[in-house]
Image (spheres, grey):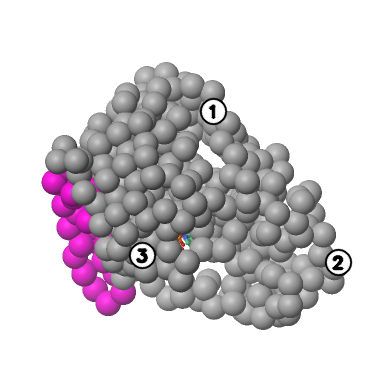
């Protein structure tokens, strides 16, 4: 036991992020770990399908020895071997988030000088996780700026509760991952509102667009609705802003029983919040960029007030590598995160 790095899963928000970041860092550094108190602060603690899928995916790519990976378990041991490039197919049997699974394994595969392909099956647009579109249009452009050659393609959308979405990612060998530097947004190049609909009444996207229009200074041609296939019905309002130096995707999910004007008003509120500051990197993207920056061993970006997830990722990365991100408040609502 003594050669295992001990991780307390109840740290900070005490959720699944601590498990996922620890798995990735364990693979990247070749450090065997024991994680205890997994998701201790969640109403249903322990490992759920999505977390088990992340553990098994990490095991697959690093030929790890594991124990304790059972439903509801609050403790696992994970001993990675070397990370191997390959053609992988990861399935979550539920609408569990495939994007969070991707963010667990892709940073490890990105460091290899061989091509990997990954197919993901499960949830693609779910609550409390990045949507596929957030990954494709906000997260990956930042990785590409760091020199990572990664492409994605969606075949089927996966909404709660059945999931059943499918998408793929290809990582090509690239030069060593470089430090990221994003201090300002730069010019606004374009903006787009995409309303995605699956098996829902036709009036929903129309009402959502009508509600959103007066909240934005966008013209009608910036709005479009699209109908997609999926096992479960779904509705996403995706507000996308493309600047010279960064992009932001603000996705709001509709759900049965929630009126379309409420979904649209919620989306408009999140857009106002993002536009209220000049911070280039949004709250969610901020926590997600720490891992790639740790691989690059450097970088700097500006963001809004860091979330608990951002603090937790800093802590976990420090436990593995001793690298400590500096969080500095530079003005009201603007923080600089650097390594
Ligand atoms: P669990 O709920 O399984 O315990 P968790 O607590 O780690 O897991 P969350 O805290 O909800 O899960 O979030 C996980 C990740 O999803 C974080 O990286 C966060 O930035 C990201 N995320 C959550 N909501 C959004 C969103 N609307 N857009 C983009 N990313 C998001």
Seen from the viewer's position, the closer of residues 237 and 259 is 259
Give neighbour class at mark 2: few <14, some 14-19, many 20+ (Cα, 10 Å).
few
Residue 302 horizontal/vertical position (percent): 30, 60
The mark found on residue 202 in the picture is 2
The answer to whether residue 201 is above or below residue 179 is below
Question: For mark 3, what is the residue?
Answer: 40
Structural distance between the alpha carbons of marks 2 and 1: 37 Å
Which image quarter holds the N terminus?
top left
Give neighbour class at mark 1: few <14, some 14-19, many 20+ (Cα, 10 Å).
some
Span highlighted in magenta in the image: 310-337
Residue 181 horizontal/vertical position (percent): 29, 48
- The secondary structure type at the circle numbered 1 is strand
Seen from the viewer's position, the closer of residues 33 and 288 is 33
**Left or right: where 44 falls relative to 327:** right
Residue 196's quadrant in the figure? Answer: bottom right
Between disc 2 and disc 3, the foreground one is 3
Q: Are marks 2 and 3 in contact (CB under 8 Å)?
A: no
Is residue 170 on the magenta stretch? no
Q: Residue at 86% across / 66% down in the picture?
A: 202
Q: Earlier in the sequence, mark 2 or mark 1?
A: 1
Q: Residue at 42% across / 36% down in the picture?
A: 58
Q: Residue at 27% across / 63% down in the picture?
A: 11
**Left or right: where 223 falls relative to 92:** right
Residue 335 horizontal/vertical position (percent): 26, 66
Residue 148: tell me if it is visible.
Answer: no
The answer to whether residue 24 is above or below residue 30 is below
């Amino acid at each position: 036991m003594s050669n295992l790095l001990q991780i307390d899963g109840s740290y900070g928000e005490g959720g699944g992020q601590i498990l996922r970041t620890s798995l990735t860092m364990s693979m990247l550094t070749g450090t065997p770990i024991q994680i205890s108190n997994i998701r201790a602060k969640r109403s249903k603690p322990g490992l759920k399908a999505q977390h088990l899928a992340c553990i098994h995916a990490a095991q697959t790519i690093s030929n790890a020895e594991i124990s304790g990976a059972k439903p509801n378990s609050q403790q696992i041991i994970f001993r990675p071997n070397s990370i191997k490039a390959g053609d992988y197919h990861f399935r979550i049997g539920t609408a569990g988030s495939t994007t969070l699974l991707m963010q667990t394994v892709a940073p490890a595969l990105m460091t290899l000088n061989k091509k990997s392909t990954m197919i993901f099956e499960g949830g693609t647009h779910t609550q409390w996780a990045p949507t596929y579109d957030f990954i494709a249009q906000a997260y990956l452009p930042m990785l590409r700026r760091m020199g990572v050659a990664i492409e994605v393609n969606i075949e089927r959308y996966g909404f709660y509760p059945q999931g059943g979405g499918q998408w793929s990612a290809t990582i090509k060998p690239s030069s060593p991952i470089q430090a990221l530097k994003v201090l300002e947004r730069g010019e606004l190049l374009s903006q787009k509102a995409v309303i995605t609909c699956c098996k829902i009444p036709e009036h929903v996207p129309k009402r959502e667009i009508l509600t959103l229009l007066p909240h934005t200074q966008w013209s009608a041609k910036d709005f479009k609705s699209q109908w997609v296939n999926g096992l479960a019905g779904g509705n996403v309002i995706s507000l996308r802003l493309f600047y010279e130096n960064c992009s932001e995707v603000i996705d709001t999910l509709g759900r049965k029983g929630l009126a379309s004007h409420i979904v649209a008003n919620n989306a408009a509120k999140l857009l106002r919040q993002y536009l209220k500051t000049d911070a280039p990197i949004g709250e969610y993207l901020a926590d997600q960029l720490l891992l790639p920056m740790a691989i690059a061993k450097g970088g700097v970006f500006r963001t809004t007030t860091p979330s608990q997830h951002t603090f937790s990722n800093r802590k976990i990365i420090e436990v593995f590598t001793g690298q400590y991100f500096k969080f500095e408040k530079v003005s009201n609502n603007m923080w600089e995160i650097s390594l």
